[in-house]
Image (cartoon, grey):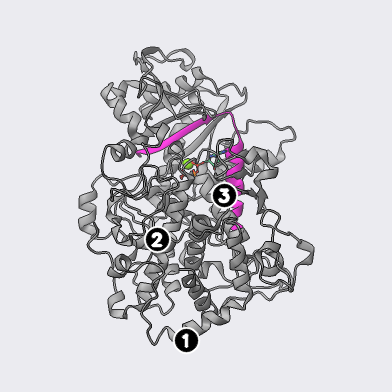
């Protein structure tokens, strides 16, 4: 157990009032005032999404189960095939995995690539079947079936606590049992011990960035979030390595198939990658004929022969067939899919969201790291994938009453917003009834009842996010472990809130060297600099995606294939996306327009951290947006969360403003009242 954990966390349940200090008395008054404000109504309406009105308010044990082999199994889930392959002399093999989305992925074949030294005609490799039906369990099931493979966040240390899956168990509120050191990043450092000694901290983003003197504890958290994002944002070298890696793979693809090109999408094309994130690519060809087993193997073996791929897996029988491998020089994990454009379309949409939504990048990266550290980010084990995270956070920011009402400056209130996000998706969101829809220009809630495509036939308790590119696709349907994800979010809310109270009551002296964010997020990768160098070097994935869309815009026919690796790109597309100049309310009547426009390359830069209210967006009255009118009697029943009113025409002309410190304090205190 963590001997460093604050005593208050262990001994005080979340509802226990903090000892009153002279500092807190005026805050109590402020909280009373707050109840009458529109803010409390807005908050109440966030709670409406939980039909059962169950506010879990339980600590979650964020400790990973150390007992048994589960952890080990899971630890290597992504590398699992690699380790199996090692036993089978993986360097010479391509592993075939079946994953059609209806069951858990299974390794069904191992193909040996025979490198004869000469190139096969047309890239067709000499493939020999090595073995078949490498099934983890003879009966066709595997550990994933009963969720044993998942490292549960449920209580596990006490004999009487919840079982393996924690379903429907009452959680023991044993707040003192955390062991925050006992989980690791998805991409663990190769030299964890050395790194730990050097840094002597799990939250390296606070090194030389001490905010303990902040008077507003929420500001401290906001600053830490920005520091974390700066800490993990890519350096010039990292971007260059990613660019070069893509270049190498693309050249190989074009050599193998002259009619094809490689497009990048996913987090590298949206600037939402963590240091260890994979690169998602798609091969599109003018013939449109590459999505078949033969082509998958052809490319896999070709890349292998060219020493551009190790740990190669061919997942041919999936809904989206892909090959996965690690590029040996950069050690970057790469996924290649075939003949589809939804990913490159989505990348464009996401970059649009980033431009229009200050704070989106920061919160997405925090949530991604949060999930990654708990191994709740792997869709194959029911976790939440990066795409779902982006949509969740975007919907949260789009629909948050205080951002909707232009009441707060998002980038100045990231701390509060992060807590609200954890609270919403951890405690209040009505997973049973509500689906989330995200489009290129906004987000909304949908009733699951009326959208059968978004319903999970097995359980109503599921996360449903409508694909912005395909209304019939629920992008989070694979996240079957939503129960644990929800618990983790709820636990994070409690942890952050308690930590804030604890540090708020502490003396400045005792605060030094402490972290708020470190209570829920750890980073144990290699030591990094605080260099967000995205503005110094072109991210070629973004540049190419921009070019792709420009070219697509010019194509009359809906051709699938668009080659972006031609002359034009060299000439005019490699333009660093300069941070948009902030327009300081030149036209006050155009409040709907995003004025901050923190571009994807800008967010996280020091310039973006200056206090500003220019990121305040649309001005809608909180009450009207949340379904409350002036005659609202405080009864939540009058509001239908499944049909939130969207009355653009009736937008009140609210004055765009940044909240003052007192308002922030009030809001912050109101969080504590829920405990
Ligand atoms: N369930 C899905 N349905 C449709 N498209 C999806 C789905 N999941 C992923 N995608 C596509 O693949 C892209 C990459 O998804 P992924 O979940 O890897 O997110 P990411 O932003 O790359 O995060 P990470 O850095 O964790 O890999 C998405 O932007 C989207 O275009
Ligand atoms: Mg990805």
Q: Residues within 10 Å of mark 3 (few under 14, many from 20)?
A: many
Residue 360 location (% of width, % of height) = 54, 58
Q: CA distance from mark 2 to mark 3?
A: 30 Å
Image quadrant where residue 639 sits: bottom right
The kind of secondary structure element at disc 1 is helix
- Residue matched to label 3: 431
Residue 336 location (% of width, % of height) = 48, 32
The kind of secondary structure element at disc 2 is helix
- Residue matched to label 2: 228
- Towards the viewer: 345 or 40: 40
Which quadrant would the N terminus be assigned to in this image? bottom left
In the rendered view, tell whether residue 97 sits above or below residue 594.
above
* Residue closest to the far right: 649
Q: In percent of the image, x 37 and y 84: which residue is there? A: 21
Dot 2 or dot 3: first in sequence order is 2
Residue 479 location (% of width, % of height) = 50, 41
The kind of secondary structure element at disc 3 is loop
Magenta span: 331-356
Q: In percent of the image, x 53 and y 74: which residue is there? A: 667
- Residue matched to label 1: 26
């Amino acid at each position: 157990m963590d001997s460093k954990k604050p005593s208050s966390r262990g001994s005080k349940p979340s509802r226990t009032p903090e000892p009153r200090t002279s500092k807190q008395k005026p805050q109590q008054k402020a909280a009373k005032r707050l109840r009458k404000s529109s803010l409390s109504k807005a908050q109440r309406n966030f709670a409406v999404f939980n039909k059962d009105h169950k506010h879990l308010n339980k600590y979650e044990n964020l400790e990973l189960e150390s007992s048994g082999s589960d952890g080990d199994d899971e630890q290597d889930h992504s590398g699992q095939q690699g380790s199996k392959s090692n036993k089978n002399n993986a360097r010479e093999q391509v592993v075939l995995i079946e994953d059609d989305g209806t069951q858990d992925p299974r390794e069904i074949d191992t193909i040996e690539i025979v490198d004869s030294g000469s190139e096969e005609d047309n890239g067709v490799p000499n493939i020999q079947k090595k073995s078949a039906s490498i099934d983890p369990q003879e009966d066709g099931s595997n550990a994933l079936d009963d969720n044993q493979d998942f490292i549960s966040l449920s209580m596990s240390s006490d004999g009487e606590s919840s079982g393996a899956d924690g379903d429907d168990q009452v959680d023991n509120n044993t707040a003192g049992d955390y062991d925050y050191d006992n989980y690791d990043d998805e991409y663990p450092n190769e030299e964890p011990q050395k790194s730990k000694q050097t840094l002597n901290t799990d939250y390296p983003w606070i090194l030389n960035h001490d905010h303990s003197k902040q008077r507003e504890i929420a500001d401290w958290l906001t600053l830490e979030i920005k520091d974390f994002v700066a800490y993990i944002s890519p350096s010039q070298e990292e971007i260059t390595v990613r660019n070069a890696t893509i270049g190498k793979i693309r050249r190989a693809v074009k050599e193998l198939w002259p009619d094809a090109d490689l497009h990048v999408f996913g987090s590298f094309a949206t600037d939402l990658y963590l240091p260890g994130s994979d690169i998602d690519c798609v091969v599109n060809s003018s013939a449109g004929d590459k999505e078949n087993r033969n082509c998958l193997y052809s490319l896999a073996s070709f890349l292998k022969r060219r020493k551009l791929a190790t740990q190669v897996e061919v997942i041919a029988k999936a809904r989206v067939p892909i090959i996965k491998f690690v590029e040996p020089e950069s050690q970057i994990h790469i996924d290649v899919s075939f003949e589809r454009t939804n990913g490159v379309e989505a990348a464009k949409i996401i970059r649009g969201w980033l431009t229009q939504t200050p704070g989106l990048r920061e919160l997405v990266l925090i949530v991604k790291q949060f999930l990654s550290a708990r191994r709740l980010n792997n869709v194959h084990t029911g976790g939440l994938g990066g795409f779902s995270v982006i949509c969740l956070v975007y919907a949260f920011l789009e629909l948050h009453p205080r951002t909707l009402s232009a009441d707060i400056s998002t980038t100045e209130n990231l701390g509060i917003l992060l807590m609200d996000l954890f609270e919403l998706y951890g405690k209040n969101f009505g997973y049973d009834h509500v689906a989330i829809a995200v489009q290129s220009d906004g987000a909304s809630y949908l009733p699951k009842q009326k959208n059968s495509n978004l319903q999970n036939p097995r359980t109503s308790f599921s996360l449903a996010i409508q694909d912005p590119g395909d209304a019939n696709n629920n992008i989070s349907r694979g996240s079957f472990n939503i129960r644990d994800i929800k618990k983790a979010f709820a636990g994070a809310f409690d942890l952050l809130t308690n930590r804030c109270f604890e540090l708020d009551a502490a003396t400045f002296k005792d605060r030094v060297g402490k972290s708020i964010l470190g209570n829920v997020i750890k980073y144990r990768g290699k030591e990094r600099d605080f260099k967000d160098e995205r503005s110094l070097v072109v991210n070629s994935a973004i540049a190419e995606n921009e070019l792709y869309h420009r070219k697509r815009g010019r194509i009359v026919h809906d051709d699938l294939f668009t080659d972006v690796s031609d002359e034009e790109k060299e000439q005019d597309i490699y333009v660093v996306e300069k941070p948009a100049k902030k327009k300081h309310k030149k036209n006050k009547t155009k409040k709907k327009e995003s004025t901050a426009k923190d571009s994807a390359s800008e967010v996280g830069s020091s310039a973006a951290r200056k206090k500003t209210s220019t990121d305040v967006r649309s001005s809608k009255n909180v009450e009207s947006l949340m379904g409350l009118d002036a005659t609202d009697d405080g009864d939540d029943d009058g509001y239908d969360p499944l049909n939130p009113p969207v009355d653009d025409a009736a937008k009140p002309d609210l004055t765009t403003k940044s909240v003052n410190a007192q308002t922030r304090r009030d809001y912050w205190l109101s969080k504590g009242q829920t405990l």
